[in-house]
Amino acid sequence: METLQRTANRGSISTGNYEIDNSLKFEPDNSEYIYRTPSSAGNRRTWTLSFWLKRTELGASMRIFEAWDGSTGTSALFTDADLFILDLNAGSNYFTSSGVFRDTAAWYHFVIRVDTTSGTASERARVYVNGSELAGSWNSNIGQNTDLTWNQDVAHNFARFHNNDSFVSGYYAEIINVDGTSLAPTAFGEVDEDSGIWIPIDASPTYGTNGFKLEFKTAGGLGADTSGNGHTWTLNAIAAADQATDTPTNNFCTLNPLVNFKYGTNAGGMTNGATVFGDNTGGGIGGAFGTFGVTAGKWYWEVKLTQQSSHYIGVSAVDDGDNVKSSSDPHQINSTFNFNIGAARIEYINGGSVTAGSLDAFTDFHTVGDIIGIALNMDDNQISIYGNGTLQAGVAASSLYDAANKMVVPFHGTINDECQYNFGGYSVWTPSSAVNDANGYGTFEYSPPSGYYSLCTKNLSEYGG
């Protein structure tokens, strides 16, 4: 997947005339999925399915979509080895990718193109990712003129297997089903000439009998079909709060499940679109990094404490090459600066040694529901902390010390406690103030300080993060 990951859409460039404004977050722990049973069958031999997907958990079987008639089905999934499989006939005819999908910072665009009427076996079912045909192999080609389960008048699901398992962890955006036409990926996207990145276009296909378009535009109607066909999807365990602005045209920072710290925290420690982090190590300090690194600009994000004992919040440089060691606690790795919330002091690496500032240098946030804001100023190598909207003056504009003039990522360390992150694109809690940064991006509980912006790719492209 090296090529696909290199060209994967991180939303880092302007998409010109077309924007995807919303996505929908899915969480396995809550059994979140959407479903619909068509009232009548459409074209089961010729169809196209296009969707954008951002993964937030790896190493588990996840059913991306499925149509199931009680005995056979058409579906796609990620395996527990992070391979992609298109299963046309419940294991009889299936395609397996040769590469894995492990880029949790990127949006992937999938196009499933089917035409079993074709006289050429290799053209009866094809998979494209970010505009390129996906490398892999079939166990056997589908027979000519085979009727598949997709577009049949049976149960269709996104983000769930019919056995009520294999739920998806991640975000879906702009799901389009075209009933009766086999379309190339260029019907839905194009390569940006300046960046070489695959980006969405305003697709206007002939949808056909069971065609639909899900844009997740209205919080009160997240399952609405905007194609004009009126094929509304039903939500299971999904609420208005699961609507996100993290999209292929403006990608937001989340927490990174790929980084493994000393105590193996990340095994099951990140949920809800990789915004909820809980240490489950049983005593050691667990750690988490953000997916975006910055070297310049001014950035803001929030952390809500849902358990209040021990938290270390700040940044860590990722260009040292030895930050994550099996022998080091996460808050004591090279070039890390953090606010020790329990001790109310700053702690940082200075010349390779851990230095701890004075106790009670700022307010001791120890109440469930406290919201901590981090203001990172990479232009001046400074960091500040806000508590429930109030700047903590005693440690305002603290030096980054060893993390200065490097590429840093958001960092969190904790001992057996949970917190909820809000980088602006999605948060599991609904901010009561719902304020944006000065560019109108991100949704926060408290207004970002003047000149500070959310960690999203539109801001990164403007401020050179």
Image (cartoon, rainbow, N blue to C red):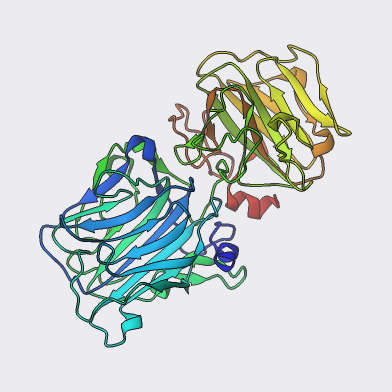
Q: Residue at x 54, y 66 (%)?
A: 4
Instruction: Relative to 411, say whether 169 is above or below.
Output: below
Query: Where, quadrant-wise, is the N terminus in this rendering?
Result: bottom right
Left or right: 345 as drawn, with respect to 214: right
Instruction: Relative to 9, say whether 422 is above or below.
Output: above
Left or right: 411 as drawn, with respect to 266: right
Left or right: 93 as drawn, with respect to 369: left
Give the residue at the far left of this rendering.
40
Residue 451 lies in quadrant: top right
Q: x, y percentage for residue 191?
A: 53, 72
Q: Nearer the viewer, residue 193 or 100?
A: 100
Q: x, y percentage for residue 116?
A: 25, 78
Q: Residue at x 41, y 64 (%)?
A: 110
Q: Nearer the viewer, residue 432 or 354?
A: 354
Q: From this viewpoint, is residue 358 visible?
A: yes
Residue 119 lies in quadrant: bottom left
Q: x, y percentage for residue 216?
A: 34, 49
Q: How many marks?
A: 0
Q: Nearer the viewer, residue 207 or 155?
A: 155
